[in-house]
Image (tube, rainbow, N blue to C red):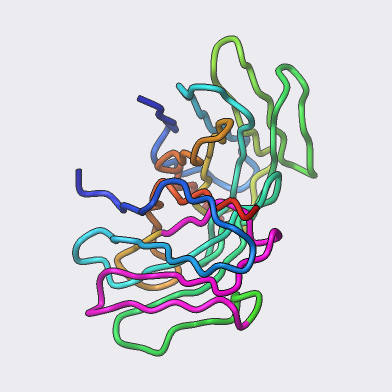
Amino acid sequence: EDKVVQSPLSLVVHEGDTVTLNCSYEVTNFRSLLWYKQEKKAPTFLFMLTSSGIEKKSGRLSSILDKKELFSILNITATQTGDSAVYLCAVEAVRNDMRFGAGTRLTVKP
Amino acid sequence: GAGVSQSPSNKVTEKGKDVELRCDPISGHTALYWYRQSLGQGLEFLIYFQGNSAPDKSGLPSDRFSAERTGGSVSTLTIQRTQQEDSAVYLCASSTGGTASEQYFGPGTRLTVT
């Protein structure tokens, strides 16, 4: 059965800390892995990863995929209170539905 | 299981036909959302239902799209006169209510318009 597992489920840090969010998956016919930030009703797309070992970076956020070990990490450096959100990982398989993880709720305290 | 369910899981239709997509939210969840995920794109918000309030339709891309939620539970997304650009995965999510609430997503319906 296809599944996407995110860890931790929740995380509380202080401003300036660096966090690493994890996403592991078991999906048949993998196509891509996507990260979203969910603050309000519409999750915001962060990254799409399709190839192993190539880091994607956007400001303080970065992500990398390991297709051999079937996981991805999302790093956030120098966290700010505005980073507080639920971070969703989703895996898209060829000709299949997207499978989302349960999300990691990140709380950044001042 | 008690998660969000959607049907059908896959739908192939010819251009110009109407389609109906169904979403069964988690029991007791008052909020229900529809999203669209086109190939390689992020989630696109379509419509939001909260309790008995009038739905937020601000994300519907055209008047060919409509949605209803009967009895505060099951929702149907209808696309009339489908176009090829409507091909996407349509995701439904539910939550306990309020825009800050964590949303639980269904597995989606992959729509292909030929």
Is B70 part of what is drawn in magenta? yes
Q: Residue at the far top: name it.
A: A68
Q: Residue at left 31%, top 52%?
A: B5
Q: Give the range drawn in magenta.
A: B63-92
The residue nearer to you, when weighing B1 against A22, is B1
Count the marks: how many? Answer: 0
State whether residue A2 is above or below residue A79: above
Where is residue A29, by image quadrant?
Answer: top right
Q: Is residue A23 toward the left or the right of residue B73 in the image?
A: right
| Residue B13 position within the rendered picture, expressed as x and y whole percent measured from the top left | 55, 56
The residue closer to the viewer here, B58 or A95, is A95
Q: Where is residue B54 in the image (x, y as percent from the top left)?
A: 41, 89
Residue sitting at x 42%, y 33%? A8
Q: In which quadrant of the rendered image does the N terminus of chain A lie?
A: top left
* Place of residue B92 in the rendered image (x, y in percent of width and height, measured from the top left): 43, 59
Q: Which of A16 and B12 is in front in this view?
A: B12
In-front residue for pair A29/A75: A29
Q: Can residue A3 be seen in this view?
A: yes
Q: Residue furthest bottom?
A: B54
Which image quadrant is residue A58 in? top right
The residue lying at 27 percent from left, 78 percent from top is: B70
The answer to if B61 sits in the magenta stretch is no
Rendered location of residue A20, percent (x, y)? 57, 31
Residue lying at 60% horizontally and 73% vertically, measured from the top left: B81
Residue A81: tell me if it is visible. no
Quadrant of image for the C terminus of chain A: bottom right
